[in-house]
Amino acid sequence: MTAEAPGLRLDLAAAAPELARAARRVARRLQEAGFTVFYAGGCVRDLLLGRSIHDVDIATAATPEQIQALFPHTRPVGAHFGVVLVLEGDFQFQVATFRTDFSYRDGRRPGEVHFSTPPEDAQRRDFTINGLFLDPFTGSVTDYVDGLPDIRDRVIRAIGQPGQRFAEDHLRLMRAVRFAAGLDFRIHPDTWSAIRGAAASLKRISCERIQEELVKSLTRARADRALDLFEASGLLAVFLPEASAMVGVPQPCAYHPEGDVFRHVRLMYEKARYPLSPSLAMAVLLHDIAKPATFRIRDRIRFHGHAELGADMAVRIMTRLKFSQELTRLVSEMVLHHLRFMHVPKMRLSTLKRFLRLENFTEHLELHRLDCAASHGDLQHYEFCRAQLEALPAEKISPPLLVSGRDLIELGLAPGPLFRKILEEVETMQLEEQLHERAEALDFVRERYCQPKKV
């Protein structure tokens, strides 16, 4: 185990100048007040890896009360755990007191903390690559946990005893997968064994936190590897058994030469363009979620009704994982409509236009591209839709309505179910380019639906 790494100097200012200046002001004020101060965790790791830096966590000997006394703009986001949010200019920094954690009771948070020293603080962190300290003023790196060799060797290794680290905070199980996939690191065998052994403990973690880790893992590059690791570790079967059920479900080779349903989904992530939006990332994961339940062999393997059932399952799954109603709706609609692309060349013009103007259609289209790229590879329907979007101006796809409900009332029609039928029929004729003007549309309604008055 080492302390300061001789000869190694990092320059935060070169990676993120404005962020570095604000962080240095915070660090300087703590130092001038007589407190030891370091940059800690992810920013040190990412500097060593040459990755972009978006935030800086600060570790110090100052207590939360002392931190709040030093800075005019603070929020005690976790003062019980020694964490204070310091606002400095346009940036905010989590400033944490060096501490040792005790008595983890809920598998997530320590029940008791003792303020301590940098070496002890490093030992309570999750993985060696996240246990490094950086001197804000000299750029020197202090390593109490052998994180530098693991960064060099591209290894995710729990600090100390892996089983203990995961027993303290079960969410670290998912974080290990996210770091391994996102950084393209391997997981040390001892740490991997502990993850597999502790997978069931993830049930104690709130759905909100699982959702957060899942989205981070699936919206960033190498999401395919994250999905593989979630499945191989047993974690996927715990937090999303419906997705784990896709493993081994065969598909017709003529359409899916890539293999089973799970392989198809992970291949879509492999071919994706990152970063993905949360809605598209979840639609990829869930678009075939109902195939295990609808699997049948008749003349060939079939999954009749899997889009419709999948849309319902997507709502249940995303509701369970505490996604917003809006995101749940968007994903469910992408799952529901993902098979409609095979019919686009034969659609009536009005049907095609309504399809092309679906909310979030760009993501519907990208889901279809990935679906094809990860299976038969035929993109003719994708290219057809792109050509139609280029050829049809927006006013042709979504033209202003020629007739309104108020117009129908003025024509003497009583509000009721018939209104919807009339308005839809008029819009269909408009989209089919059979009606062009308002007067023309009103004449059509009069002739078809308005009875002449008896004399």
Image: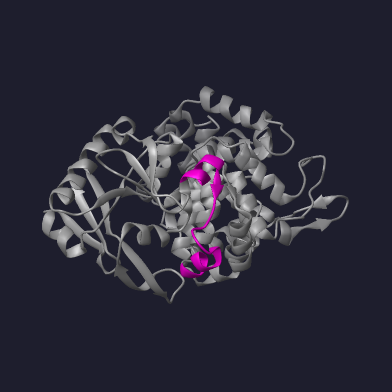
Name the foreground residue: 70 vs 340. Answer: 70
Tell me if residue 156 is in the magenta stretch: yes
In the rendered structure, the answer to whether residue 318 lies left or right of residue 381 reads: left
Q: Is residue 59 magenta?
A: no
User: Is residue 402 among the parts visible in the rendering?
Assistant: no
Stretch of the chain drawn in magenta: 148-168
Q: Residue at position x 23%, y 43% from top?
A: 23
Q: Residue at x 21, y 63 (%)?
A: 63
Asked if residue 293 lies left or right of residue 81, the reply is right
Q: Is residue 140 above or below residue 209?
A: above
Point out the residue furthest to the top here.
391
Q: Nearer the viewer, residue 371 or 424?
A: 371
Main secondary structure of the magenta stretch: helix
Looking at the picture, how far across and down is residue 199, in whole percent?
Answer: 60, 66
288 sits left or right of 18 in the view: right
Residue 307 visible to an observer of this rendering: yes
- x and y percentages locating residue 262 in the rendered image: 70, 51
